[in-house]
Image: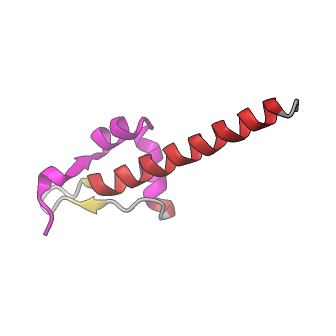
Amino acid sequence: MKKFNEYLTVGDAASYLGVATCTLRRWDAGGKLKARRHPVTGFRLYLKEELETILMGASEAENTNTMLRRRSKKQGR
């Protein structure tokens, strides 16, 4: 079982990812990110590991976009 310090609240998770809290809720509703619920309060909690996976994916996508832009500039497009 995961410990509570391995989770972030909606606000903390949004800050960590650099997005709005409503974006996290939308991703949760769409299945892109899974929120757990606090056993007492019922608040959404996000597992840090999953947030890091999203950040790595975004970083890889940005690297690919940067590479494609550089290649396009070299080819004079």
**Is 64 displayed left or right of 59 in the figure?**
right
Q: Is residue 46 at all visible to an observer of this figure?
A: no
- Residue range in magenta is 1-28
Residue 21: say if magenta.
yes
Residue closest to the eye, 36 or 68: 68
Q: In which quadrant of the rendered view does residue 35 lie? A: bottom left
Residue closest to the eye, 3 or 57: 57
Point 42% across, 35% down: residue: 18
Q: Position of residue 14 (x, y in %)?
A: 37, 40
**Is 14 displayed left or right of 6 in the figure?**
right
Q: Is residue 6 above or below residue 64?
A: below
* Quadrant (top left/top right/bottom left/bottom right) for the C terminus: top right
Q: Is residue 12 at all visible to an observer of this figure?
A: yes
* Quadrant (top left/top right/bottom left/bottom right) for the N terminus: bottom left
Point 36% across, 51% down: residue: 51
**Is 34 displayed left or right of 75 in the figure?**
left
Point 37% across, 62% down: residue: 34
Q: Position of residue 75 (x, y in %)?
A: 85, 34
Q: Residue furthest right?
A: 76
* Dominant SS type (magenta): helix
Q: Is residue 67 above or below residue 54?
A: above
Q: Position of residue 64 (x, y in %)?
A: 62, 45
Q: Residue furthest bottom?
A: 1
Q: Position of residue 48 (x, y in %)?
A: 27, 52
Residue 12: say if magenta.
yes
Q: Number of marks in the image?
A: 0
